[in-house]
Image (tube, rainbow, N blue to C red):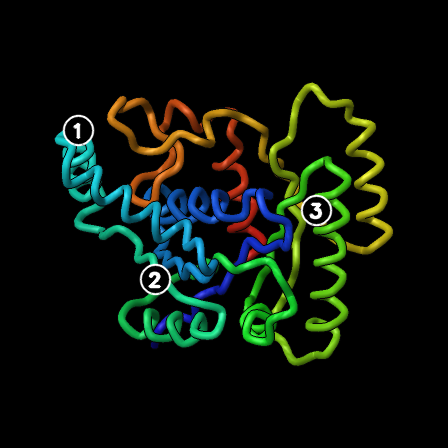
């Protein structure tokens, strides 16, 4: 019997909230470190940021002996395990493309990078077919209001109809500045609780390391579709803790 993969979307209507970066970081960690089979459906038209990142990553591996060696070492260590597929798609074709991909191989998780507007019928249908939605939030009034309104809309217009696969939605604190007063987060947490939404225990700190991709400098990389977060950068990033929490919740 083929596996029934979990469909997961880091999704919000506020640009710059980190949904694309989180999709890549979690997908790469689960696939290359934790041994799960992962696929990514990039529906974020017209940017297709993850597809473009995969293209950059592959070009760097092909042209740079250092990354070529990293790729060979990783494939050898993982006993021939391939890079996870990144499928360039659209909200209209997302589910068909995911089904086609899952027909080729068994996957544990399929991550969707979706655009952030709910005024698109195809996007609403795609969201309704997710198993889990994770919405990144930040301690910023504009981001918070936009994300909470998005969550309310998904809950009221999709989940409450009963015609959905969504099992749960979670909020994730992202870009957390350790210098900010905790009272600010307490206020927001109170609002979230009143709205009966659930926040993940793990938070993602605000750090320049999150911008590190493959480059000619060959510095330890953080964000890549071909490699996991470098071991020297994992500590303090909470990516490992986030992956563990998600695995527990998405069983």
Task: State the residue position of label 1.
Answer: 66
- Tell which of 27 and 90 is nearer to you: 90
Residue at 63 percent of width and 76 percent of height: 164
- Tell which of 206 and 201 is nearer to you: 206
- Tell which of 196 and 46 is nearer to you: 46
Quadrant of the rendered image containing residue 73: top left
> Please, is residue 199 above or below residue 130 in the view?
above
Q: Which mark is residue 76?
A: none
Q: Are dots 2 and 3 in contact, CB under 8 Å? A: no
Helix, strand or loop at mark 1: helix
Quadrant of the rendered image containing residue 140: top right
Task: State the residue position of label 2.
Answer: 87
* 229 horizontally vs 60: left or right: right
Dot 2, crowdedness within 10 Å: few (<14), some or many (≥20)?
Answer: some
- Residue 63's x, y, as percent? 14, 36
> Disc 2 and disc 3: Cα gap in Å?
29 Å
User: Nearer the N terminus, badge 2 or badge 1?
Assistant: 1
Residue at 54 percent of width and 41 percent of height: 242
> Disc 2 and disc 1: Cα gap in Å?
26 Å
């Amino acid at each position: 019997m083929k596996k029934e993969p979990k469909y997961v979307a880091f999704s919000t209507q506020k640009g710059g909230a980190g949904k694309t970066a989180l999709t890549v970081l979690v997908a790469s960690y689960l696939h290359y470190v934790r041994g799960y089979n992962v696929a990514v459906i990039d529906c974020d038209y017209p940017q297709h940021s993850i597809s473009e990142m995969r293209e950059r990553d592959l070009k760097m591996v092909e042209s740079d002996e250092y990354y070529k060696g990293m790729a060979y070492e990783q494939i050898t260590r993982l006993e021939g395990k391939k890079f996870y597929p990144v499928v360039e798609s659209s909200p209209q074709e997302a589910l068909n493309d995911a089904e086609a991909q899952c027909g080729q191989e068994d996957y544990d998780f399929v991550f969707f990078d979706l655009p952030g507007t709910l005024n698109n019928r195809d996007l609403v249908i795609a969201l309704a077919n997710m198993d889990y939605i994770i919405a990144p939030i930040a301690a910023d009034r504009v981001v918070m209001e936009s994300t909470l309104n998005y969550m309310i809309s998904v809950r009221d217009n999709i989940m409450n109809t009963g015609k959905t696969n969504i099992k749960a939605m979670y909020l994730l604190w992202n870009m957390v500045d350790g210098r900010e007063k905790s009272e600010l987060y307490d206020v927001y947490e109170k609002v979230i609780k009143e709205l009966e939404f659930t926040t993940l225990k793990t938070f993602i700190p605000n750090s320049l390391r999150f911008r590190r991709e493959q480059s000619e400098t060959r510095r330890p990389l953080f964000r890549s579709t071909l490699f996991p977060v470098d071991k020297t950068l994992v500590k303090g990033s909470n990516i490992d803790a986030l992956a563990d929490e998600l695995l527990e919740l998405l069983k």
